[in-house]
Image (tube, coloured by chain):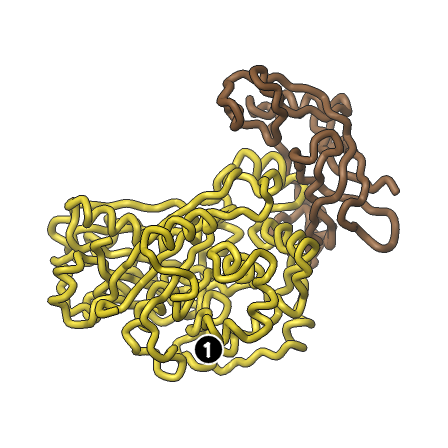
Chain colours: A yellow, B brown
Amino acid sequence: MIGAIVGVGSTEYSRHSGRSESRLAVEAVTAALADAGLTATAIDGIVCYPDGPPAEDLISGLGLPDVRFTATPHLGGASSVASLQLAGAAISAGVATTVVCVFARNGSSRSRIEDRVDRIVPGQRFRQNLERPHGLSIPAQWYSLICRRHMYEFGTTREQLGSVSLLMRSNAQLNPGAQMYGRELRMEDYLKSPPIALPYLLHDCCLETDGGCAVIVTRLDAARDTRVQPVRIAGVAEGHPNSPDDIASRTPFFETGLRHAARRLFASTGIEPCDVDVAMIYDCFTFEVIHQLEEAGFCDPGQGGPFVESGAASLTGSLPVNPHGGLMSEGHLGGMNHVIEGVRQIRGECADRQVAGAGIAAVTGWGDLGDGSMALLVRDDY
Amino acid sequence: MTTEHPSAERPLPDISDSELAPYWLGAAERRLLVQRCEICGTKRWPPRPACADCGGLHAEWVEVPGTGRVYSWTEVHRTRLDYFRSKMPYTVAVVELADDPRLRMIGLLTVQTGDGPDFGMDVRADFQAINDNVYLVCWRATS
């Protein structure tokens, strides 16, 4: 792939931003432009996030003179990573030269998941007619069905789920920008947190957050002229499971889009899972981390729980996962914060949570009913 | 969180939806119907516009036995649906049909025994009349 990330930026992450999502988007892009040392006029492409501010808000808000490409992926939480693919495709095709991928949401103060699912999740015919009359209507409930079956088939334990939650929280203690900075979590706190949709407890679930994130992608040759060390996008892929509009009837039941995306991505880049230095895994819920570690090929099926419990995913382990604290403890920025953390890890800017010598970062996305995406970001001199 | 909402109406399916209407008509007669491809004979659930196996565009609705086994379940303690707030906790299961385990359905599950649901537990379709026209296919443990 010929694209590179030359700028990343974000707002603060909070429970109540007190400003519009369009304003958050503009602030995040402005921060990313400053990071890149570019002016707004350089942007000629915009990839938006589903249910987020439209491109028009950015064109008017930033005064962009001639935007030539706009697009919105529709993979739920897998959209942030998938947006890198759209940006790269537009650049490769010569449709645009510099594309900004934007996420902005008042997910805590305005647009809670309960409100969003009816607008963005696929298969609404099945949701409305076959699930909601039975009281099933939110991701925690859908995904807990997969989690419970995984616990049965592979012996994944409550404590392994808890170890994911504790890892995200302990990593966030090294990230002053994280919403859960300064708020430690112990296993006993996890175990006694209230039930949401068993097996999911409160602390199996990610946060809801107000904030914005932006990532600027440009041609690799142009990237080498920018202010910061460019981070090369070695490759990006998206994937879709069978029965992407219905979890219950999926066969095989544990198949995700990430399985397909990761297989293609590792094959096309020549990078292998063991080459990856740090992984940002889309942690909407604890089990989804375990599941994606398996689906991406970092573990064998059924080994994700033991992997995390062993400490392999900790900052000093063989594959540090989410040094920033993830959606569970840094904030839920739709995974665009995972892309940003991947870039900053490669650039070596992460201070106390820096993974020493990180040269290859993997970033995954999980969205809707099992759509997946994955990017491999590498240091330019790697 | 567990505030009673006695006036909240139960979320109802749209039984006139063209892709699901035969299923609801069957349920009102206490019969469990699924689609079957008229070309290759593969049964499918939920209903889809074409057969994923052969591409056949024509399907018929056929009755299958209303028996199955618990494949997975969730116990709901938090809901956005007002009607269900007073019902919590309640259990929603994925049931694999005895007739063809590739067919799995979602539904409220009732288990009378004290230990709650278990994997592979035998269940039977429980056609619950919600009003004169709507019969929901719920599940009940048969042990």
Residue B35 falls in which quadrant of the image?
top right
Residue A101 visible, this orientation = yes
Quarter of the image that includes the C terminus of chain A: bottom left
- Secondary structure under tag 1 reads loop
Q: Residue at x 55, y 81 (%)?
A: A184
Q: Which residue is mark 1?
A: A315
Taking the image as shown, residue A316 lies to the left or right of residue A132, namely left
Q: Residue at x 47, y 73 (%)?
A: A318
The residue at the point 68 percent across, 21 percent down is B25
Could you tell whether A339 is left or right of A29 in the image?
Answer: right
Closer to us: B7 or A81? A81
List x then y, in percent, for residue A137: 59, 46
Q: Chain of mark 1?
A: A
Residue A24's spot in the image, x, y percent? 31, 63
Q: Quadrant of residue A18?
A: bottom left
Local packing at callout 1 (Cα closer than 10 Å; few below 14, some 14-19, many 20+) is many
Q: Nearer the viewer, residue B83 or A161?
A: A161
A55 to the left or right of A188? left
The picture quadrant where one finds residue A253 is: top right
